[in-house]
Image (cartoon, coloured by chain):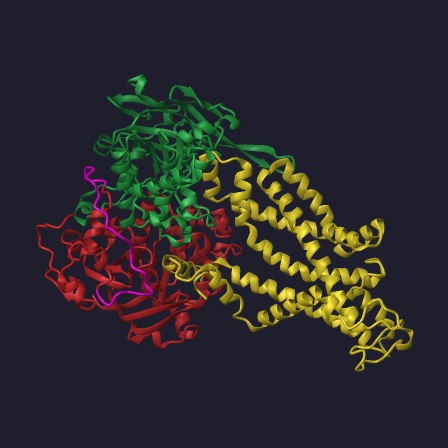
Amino acid sequence: MADTIANIDQIVQSQSRATVSEWQRFVRTLTQRKVVVFALIIIALTVITAIFAPWLSPYDPNEKNFADSLQQPNRKHWLGTDLLGKDTLSRIIWGARTSLIVGIATCLASAILGSTLGMLAGYMGGVVNTIIMRFMDALMGFPMIVLALLLAGVLGNGMQNVIIALTVANLPGYTRLMCGMTLAVKENDYILAQKAIGSSNLRTLFLHILPNSFQPMIIMISTALGGIILAEAGLSFLGIGLSHEEVTWGGLVASGYSYLSTHPMLAFAPGLCVMLVVFSFNILGDGLRDALDPRLRGVL
Amino acid sequence: MGRLLEVKNLRTQFKTFDGIVKAVDGVSFYLDEKEIIGIVGESGCGKSVTQLSIMQLINRPGKIVGGEVWFEGKDLLKYKQHGPEMRSIRGGKIAMIFQEPMTSLNPVLTLGYQLAESLILHLKMSKEEARKRAIELLGMVGIPSPEDRIDDYPHQFSGGMRQRVMIAMALACNPKILIADEPTTSLDVTTQAQLLELMVDMVHKFNSSLILVTHNLGVVARYAQRIYIMYAGRIVEEGTCKEIFKRPRHPYTKGLLRSVPRLDVEGERLIPIEGLPPRLTDLPDQCAFLPRCPYKTEKCSTSPMPELRSVPGEGHKIRCYVDIPEVDYATV
Amino acid sequence: MPQSKNDVVLEVKDLKMHFPITRGLFRKVVGMVKAVDGISFALKRGETLGLVGESGCGKTTVGRCISRLYQPTSGEIYFKGKNIADVPEKELKPLRRNISMIFQDPYSSLDPRQNAGSIVGEPMVVHRLVKSRDEYKEKVKHLFEIVGLNPELTTRYPHEFSGGQRQRIGIARALAADPDVIICDEPVSALDVSIQAQIINLLMDLKSEGEKRLTYIFIAHDLSVVKHISDRIAVMYLGRIVELTTPRELYNNPLHPYTQALLSAVPVPDPEVEENRERIILEGEVPSPLFPPNGCALHQRCPIATPECSKTVPPLRECSEDHWVACLRI
C-alpha cells in the first residue's frame, strides 16, 4: 500500500508544475470542510468582539448596580446580572478581550522563545542540545496547570504574571517541536549545500531552517491557543489568575457557579463561550494541518 | 505456450487539483506461460500504475476507469477490489515484488511468521508444514542457515538479503505470474546482478512467468524475451527484445537507446531527447511525443494520436506514423 | 603519483575519515566506521576524476572531505599547493568559493522556500561577489542561460521545476562563485534516462566551453556514466581505492577482481552483446565498514584469493603506465 501512495506522490509531483498558486490551494483546502468555516467565523466574531468591546458592551462591566442585583435574563440585561448587579453580557464581551490577549500573548511569547531554543538545540546538537532538552523535559514533567499555579502563586496576581506563568508552562512543547523540526530539516541536502557555498550558521538558521520548519509551528499555535484560553479560565476559576478588576471568562464561571441552580446563565454563558472558542481553535488547527500537508499538495 | 495474462485497453486515472491525470491510457499487452517480458519507461509513464491496476491496488484519488484483465479465463477487473476472489489472486496466483524492500516487510513480525502467513492463507497448510516450507524457501533464495534466521526480524537483514526474502515470499505460493516493479533499483550494482540472476532462476524453477518493470534498458536486454516501451501512459512500441534493440522503430525508443552511455562503446557524445515528458493532465490530441520528436512530419501535427500498427519483424508494433529509414539521417 | 607538479590542482595524500560510533548519555565511543581509510590521488587542472563504488565504499565521504564539509581524521589535501585538511572552520570561506558541490537528489538539495534565482545567486551574496542589485540580477540571468534554463524563470520555486531542471539549478549554483573544482556527487543517478544525457552533456560542455578549465570529481555508482565522462577512474571498495586508471584501460583490461565483477554486473542495452558476455558474480555482500575484514577487504568474496590475502593489506601500485592496482595476485 505504501507503494501505491508513493506512486501517487510521484505522479502528482511529476505533474505539479503549479498552475494554481499555493495560496489559492491553501484557501480551498482549508475552506473545504464546513466545520472549519464555522470555526473561522466564531474566531472572527470573538476577535471583533474583543477589539470593539468598549462600543459593543451595553454597560460598564465593573459598574455595580445593587438595584439590579441577580436578575434573570430580561430586555434590559440580556443575560442577567450577578450579585453586585454587573451586566453579564458586558462582562462576557470584555472577558473576550482578556482571554484573547492572554491567549495570543502567551502563544507568541512561548512560540518565539521556544522556537529559538529548539532551533539552537537542534542545530548545535551535543551539549547545547542536552542542556536545553533536559531542562525542557524537567519542565514537562510538571502538569501544565500545576506549574502555572505555582508560578502564579509566586509571582502574584495580574495579567502579566498569568502570561509569564502560562508561557513557561507552554515552552517545552514548542521547544520540542522546533528541535525535532530542525533536526529533520538539517538532514536535507540544501542545508549541506549552504555549508558548501560558505554560508554562516546564522544565515543558514534564519534564512533556511526557520522558514522550512515554520508550518507545524502555525498548526501548534492555533491548537495551543484554545488550550491556553482554557488554562487561563481554569486559573481564574481557581482564583489565582487575574486581579478582580480584570474580567475573564474563567473568573465569570467561578463567581457564577454558586448560583448554578437559581441563575444558571451566570456560569453557563461564559462557560459556553470558552467551549466554543477552544473548540474553534482546535478545529482550525486541524484544518491548517490538512491544508498545509505537503502530501496533499495538488491532490485536492 | 499458452496465453496466461491478457490486458486489454486498460485505463487508470487520478483525480488531482490540476485536472485528471491519465496515468494509464489504453494499455494492452499479453504474457505467455514461462515467459519473461519487460515493461520499460521513465518515471511517470504509467508502467507501475499499470501493474497496480492489474492487482487492483489503486486507491483514491486513483480509479480504474476501463479495460479488461483476462487471467485464467476470468476478467479480474470484474471482481471487487477487496473481494475474496481478488484476495486469493493477490499474493496467491499473481505475486508482486516492490522496489523498496524496507517498506514491503512488516517490521514487527518475524520473517518466518510473514512467510508462513501467506502459505497458511493461500495453500491451507498447517503451521508446521508452513514453517518447514518457509525454511526451505529461504534456503532456496540463498539465505545462509535459514533454520536460524527464520525467527529474525526484517531489520536484522541487509537490503539485499531483504530483497531475497521478498523473492521467497513472492514465490511462496507458486504464483503463475511474478510482477517485479523496479526490483533492484535501490540496490548496489553487484547485489543487483546477484538478485536478478536469482529471480530469473527462481522463476524458471517455479515455471512462472515474469513481468519485469524497469527503466533500465540493460536489465531488459539481459533477461526479457519481449518488451513493451511506454510513454505518457501508452505503449509506444512492442516486439521481441532482439528486434527492438537491433532495429528500434519508434523515435522515443531510438532516443532512449541513444541517450544512455554504454559501457562497451567508446565515449561518443550522447544524444539526449530534448525537452520534457508531457504533463498527463493535458495531453495533446496528437502524438504525445510530438514536441520532442526529431522525426516529426506534417502529418504528425495534423493527425490524431496514432494507433499501434504492425511493422516488419515478429510481433513488432509501433505507435507512430513515420517510417524511420535504416540509414538514419536525422541523428541531430 | 603526480607527473607535472605545476599543473596539479588537487592532491590527496593518505586521506582517512573515521566516524566514531557513540552510545549512551556520555557519548562513549564504542566503535569506528572507517569510511575512508587511506586514499591518495592527484588531479590536474581540467581533468575529470571518476570515483565509482557501491554504497558504503566511502566515495561520498571522499568528496565531502575535499570540500571540507567533513574534517578528515588524518591525511593531507593540497589545493593549489596549500594543505587544506587542517584549516579551521572559520578560515574555510575562501576555500568554499573555489571548491563547490553538486548534489545527488534534485529534490532535497534545493530549499523549497527559496526561489530559483535566489538559490543560484546566494553564493555571490555570501562571498560578496556583486556590487549592485543590477549586477546580481544580470549574473543570475547569465548563469541560468549557461545551464540552459529560461532566465525568466528566476522567480519560480523549486517545486515548479522538473527533476532535470532542478539539477540545472543546482549546477548553476555550483558555478555561481566561479570555482576551480566542482565535486559532483551522483549528479544524474536520481534522474530519468533521457534527462541524464542532457545533464551529462551540460557538465561536459561547461568544461570544454568555459574560459576557466574546470576540474571535476565525478562520484557515481553507475560505471557506464563514469566511464563516459571521466579522464581517469578510481574504483573504490570499503574505503580504499582498488584500481585507478583511464576509462579505456579500465574497460579493456580490468585487473582487480572487484573491478571485473563490477563491470560484468552492468548490463549493456544490447541483447546480442549480453548473450556472449561472461558474468562474474561476487558471492555475498559488502562487509560492514564497522568491522572490515583483515587484509584485503575483498578476500572473502574474491574468486582468486589466497591465504596471504587475508593477512596483508595490498598497496596501490603502478602495474603499467598510469594503471594502478591494489591486489596481491597481480
**Highlighted range, magenta:** B263-286
Reply yes or no: does residue B282 show up in magenta. Answer: yes
Who's the residue at 73% across and 48% down the image? A139
- Say whether residue C188 is left or right of residue A275: left
Residue B94, image x, y percentages:
35, 65
Residue B318, image x, y percentages:
17, 62
Report the chain shown in red: B
Residue C33, image x, y percentages:
49, 33
Instruction: Kindly give the residue lying farthest to the front in the view shown.
Output: A55
- Say whether residue A134 is left or right of residue B272: right
Report the chain shown in yellow: A
Considering only vertical position in the picture, is B186 above or below B7? above
Residue B47 seen by the camera: yes
Dominant SS of magenta comes to loop
In the rendered image, which quarter contains the N terminus of chain A?
A: bottom left
Q: How many marks?
A: 0
Residue A123, image x, y percentages:
57, 40
Reply yes or no: does residue A38 show up in magenta. Answer: no
Considering only vertical position in the picture, is B268 above or below C36? below
Q: B185 or C188, which is in the foreground?
A: C188
Q: Colour of chain C?
A: green
